Image (cartoon, helix red, strand yellow):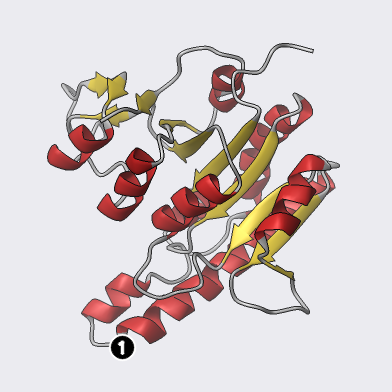
Amino acid sequence: MSKLKYKRLLLKLSGEALAGDNKFGIDPATVVAICAEISEIVKLGVELAIVIGGGNIFRGLAASAKGMDRSSADYMGMLATVMNSVAVQDALEKLGHSTRVLSAITMQEVCEPYVRRRAERHLEKGRVVICAAGTGNPYFTTDTAATLRGMELKCDAIVKATKVDGVYDKDPMKFSDAVMFHELGHMETVNKQLGVMDNTAITLAMENNLPIIVCNMFGGNIRRLVLGEKVGTIVQGG
């Protein structure tokens, strides 16, 4: 077996990624394609935890801006992440990977409650752990949830899988002269307002020396970085 640079990873997926070319909902073909990429690193022996956003179904902050109570809107967003998590679980299990959804909001008929020691045990047994419902609290994003779970589960790094190759100085979809960064400091991303993750998530990662790697979710990039290749943008240090 190839030597792994990262033995245990936290993979952060946006809810929008599951929508594919659609603006809303879950596109089954896209979910299968994403899970095929995930399958490659699980086969290598990586212990994998996943946090998925819910923006393809409901975005709490946007609803709050339109007059909905922020706490109610955020709880609806958390429930959306559970739906996404179950979709990814189904696709991974069809690929032959044992998977558990652990939710920060208890719903025992659908998934297990999130308990740190239980999650660690699942990882040790080679199961993919999908951490759903964010932190279980309003006013915290799934970015922050990803950093929190990454620290709790003693992950070697957070991988934020996106549609672009890394972190750029401006939107590469709009500007042909956008320049990609290969390395950044945690505070540098905050000061430059690069939008890697929200400031709470970045600060938590910095205080706990947790690297964040931003890369394209397709093309075998996650597999390559696990094996030690330089892929995407790594955010680490001050």
- Viewer-proximal residue, 89 or 193? 193
Quarter of the rendering containing residue 72: bottom left
> How many numbered marks have been drawn onto this rendered protein structure?
1
Q: Is residue 122 above or below residue 78?
A: above
Taking the image as shown, residue 194 lies to the left or right of residue 26, namely left
Q: Is residue 25 above or below residue 127?
A: below
Q: State the residue position of label 1.
A: 69
* Residue 116 seen anywhere in this rendered image of the structure: yes
At x 61% / y 58%, what residue is drawn? 131
- Viewer-proximal residue, 86 or 11? 11
At x 21% / y 37%, what residue is drawn? 187
Q: Quadrant of the N terminus?
A: top right
The percent position of residue 153, horizontal first and vertical second, equals 61, 47
The percent position of residue 142, horizontal first and vertical second, equals 44, 59
- Viewer-proximal residue, 197 or 58? 197
Q: Quadrant of the C terminus?
A: top left
Taking the image as shown, residue 171 lies to the left or right of residue 220, namely left
Taking the image as shown, residue 77 lies to the left or right of residue 102, namely left
Label 1: how many Cα within 10 Å (few below 14, some 14–19, many 20+): few
The percent position of residue 234, horizontal first and vertical second, equals 38, 25
Q: Secondary structure at mark 1?
A: loop
Q: Is residue 96 above or below residue 81?
A: above
At x 20% / y 21%, what residue is drawn? 179
* Residue 174 seen anywhere in this rendered image of the structure: no
The percent position of residue 93, horizontal first and vertical second, equals 81, 49
Name the residue type under label 1: Asp
